[in-house]
Image (tube, rainbow, N blue to C red):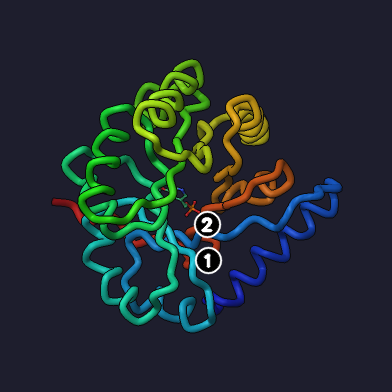
Amino acid sequence: MRDVADNLAQVKETMAKAMTDHFVDHPMPQVVAVSKRFPAERIEPLLAAGHRCFGENQVQEAQEKWPALKARYPDVSLHLLGPLQSNKVAAAVALFDVIESLDREKIARRIKVAAEAHGRMPTLFVQVNTGEEEQKSGVFPSDLPALLKVCREELGLSISGLMCIPPLDEEPAIHFAFLKHLAEENGVPRLSMGMSADYPTAAAVGADYVRVGTALFGDRPEAATP
Ligand SMILES: *Cc1c(COP(=O)(O)O)cnc(C)c1O
């Protein structure tokens, strides 16, 4: 297995090439290193190599791993990528620096309350279900303007970006371009899109964040079965 820092360098090189090939005039996307289901020992080498941007998809798992790591590396930026249940919002607000999976009004309201209670407001992204898949989280594109309006006008929440996970069996570039269009139309500045299988495409479309797990860390351990 290659060194995880070498893998990160490779990911950046691949993005740089994709951007050059497509004449993209945009800063290189930040790599959110998706460390879900990997233990702290696997994360440490990337921290030691200077990387500071990480993603997890479960609040509870992140609570077990990250407080100790963040104590040693206080400048880490930790992104929540997975669906957020309302009973986990307070814990998420306390631990995460970026919440990428805001997708409904109820969660937005809870975030506001929790942020006031904790005196810290994470950066917020709205997850958009660009493929309108029933089983997937994310607000449907047609409901995005109303959600943004509640967040901005009623709750005073600033929405920094949009995030999407395209359907597995569809061309990701179409979804990335659609997300970019939605962001422009709704005045949202940043885009989180692209995973191990399609991050070069996302970089070529103008992503600000790519979320890369297996291409850095290798195959993920199975989820523990309860
Ligand atoms: C797991 C996960 C990723 C990373 O997936 P890889 O294919 O391992 O790169 C990215 N985004 C989200 C929302 C995830 O849950």
- The crowd level at tag 2 (other Cα within 10 Å; few <14, some 14-19, many 20+) is many
The verdict on label 2 being within 8 Å of ligand 1 is yes
Report the disc number at residue 7: none
- Give residue 70's position: percent from left, percent from top: 34, 73
Determine which residue is flagged by label 1.
216
Q: Amino acid at mark 2?
A: Val
Q: Amino acid at mark 1?
A: Leu
The verdict on label 1 being within 8 Å of ligand 1 is yes
Question: Which residue corresponds to the image point at 47% horizontal and 30% vertical from the top-left?
Answer: 128
User: Measured along the vertical axis of the image, is residue 144 above or below residue 111?
Assistant: above
- Give residue 175's position: percent from left, percent from top: 61, 30
Is residue 63 rendered to the left or right of residue 156? left
Question: Which residue corresponds to the image point at 46% horizontal and 78% vertical from the top-left?
Answer: 47
Q: Secondary structure at mark 1?
A: helix
Is residue 118 rendered to the left or right of residue 208? left
Determine which residue is flagged by label 2.
212
- Give residue 61's position: percent from left, percent from top: 25, 59
Is residue 191 rendered to the left or right of residue 132? right
Mark 2 → mark 1, Cα distance in angstroms: 7 Å
Question: Which residue corresponds to the image point at 57% horizontal and 52% vertical from the top-left?
Answer: 210
Are the residues flagged by discs 2 and 1 in contact, CB closer than 8 Å? Answer: yes
Question: Which residue corresponds to the image point at 57% horizontal and 60% vertical from the top-left?
Answer: 31
